Amino acid sequence: MLKKIQKVTALAVTLILVCTSMAPAWAAPAAVSTRIKDVAKVQGVRANQLVGYGLVVGLAGSGDSTRNIPTMQSIANMLNDFGVTVTADQLKSKNVAAVMVTAQLPPFVKSGDNIDITVSSMGDAKSIAGGTLMQTPLKAGNGQIYAVAQGPVSTGGFSAGRGSNSQQKNFPTVGTTPNGAIVERDVAVELSNNGTINLALAQPDFTTASRISEAINSQFGLIARALDPGTVEVNVPQEYRGELVSFVAAVEELPVVPDNVAKVVINERTGTIVMGSNVSIDEVAVAQGGLSVKISKQYNVSQPPPRSDGSTVITPETTVDVTEEEANVMLLPATSNVGDVVNALNAIGATARDIIAVLQAMKAAGALHADLQLI
């Protein structure tokens, strides 16, 4: 008979179950449908990364030091553009910091739109809080300028004091400027290529791609086919050629039941285990127990009688205690219900590390039909 063991505390193990239903072991998990737009997107509709090099001015002595030659040279170059002739050696200011400016250029933005930017110090500045970013061109991977950034920088942190008497909150060398960049160039996006659009799956899967094409064909006729596990080609009907946006919106709202590979994700640092509802096991026996050995040492002092020729003697005494816990054995029947697996492991008093070790052993024994992923 198995003894009742207290449930593992929340501090000992964090167990997250992703189950669509708590059906009996002989019942298949309930399928949940979602929209096509949640598992796939129109190919070509994506953001672009922008980056630029600039200067943040107006810092209260917390900028780059004069030892930072690139910053001093950048200041001199900027002043030369305004007609002020000065060399890097003549500059002694600590109110300027060299920064890298990054941004995401969303699809379909137009010239004149505003986007957010992130400003990061690249020198030895202590803080860029309260500074103002000077006009900085932002380039894409092709070397062309797509936006220009400028404005006050907000860090949400601070750094005060020196040495051991300093105080710091968050990261004062990184800040943001909402709507700090103006888009200067439109990004062309081709939704349709010769009357067809391609849907790119977020998680490539043969079954999901086939189900998406079937869902589209059932609604609009035979216009879709799965090219590969990650792409579904859709021929735009003639009546929608002039209303491509409406057609894509209608396709994205169609329901589909995605299929995923059975997977168990384990985070050993936090003891978190995430298992999908399609994880199944074969009949397997699990034993959990342990041997505990405790060695303690104490010192006994022998004191001779008064006025004797004896001397004080200290003798060590070592005690060895061996405790062997009763090995709890649990027979896990073949089931497709994740709840049964977890309940059985909890019944034998498994901790977070025990559950992780058991799952790894079950996978090695071929009883766990899922991919184990460690993060």
Image (cartoon, rainbow, N blue to C red):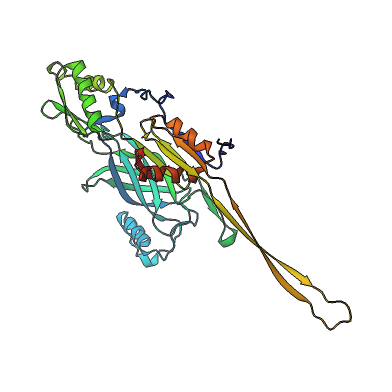
Q: Position of residue 150 (x, y in %)?
A: 36, 44
In this rendering, the answer to whether 272 lies above or below 249 is: below
Which sits in the foreground, 256 or 199?
256
Relative side of 114 to 92, left or right: left
Q: Quadrant of the N terminus?
A: top right
Which sits in the foreground, 43 or 29?
29
Which sits in the foreground, 220 or 227?
227
Q: Give the residue at the far bottom of this rendering.
A: 309
- Is there any visible trace of residue 153 in the rendered image? no
Relative side of 301 to 162, left or right: right
- Is there any visible trace of residue 311 in the rendered image? yes
In this rendering, the answer to whether 344 lies above or below 248 is: below
Q: Give the residue at the far right of this rendering.
A: 307
Relative side of 312 to 199, left or right: right
Count of number-bearing discs: 0
Q: Residue at 42% of width from left, 37% of height from top?
A: 274
Q: Position of residue 310 (x, y in %)?
A: 82, 81
Q: Give the residue at the far front of this rendering.
A: 1
Q: Residue at 14% of width from left, 27% of height from top?
A: 196
**Rendered image quadrant of residue 285:** top left
Q: Position of residue 364 (x, y in %)?
A: 36, 46
Q: Residue at 10% of width from left, 28% of height from top?
A: 194
Q: Position of residue 268 (x, y in %)?
A: 45, 47
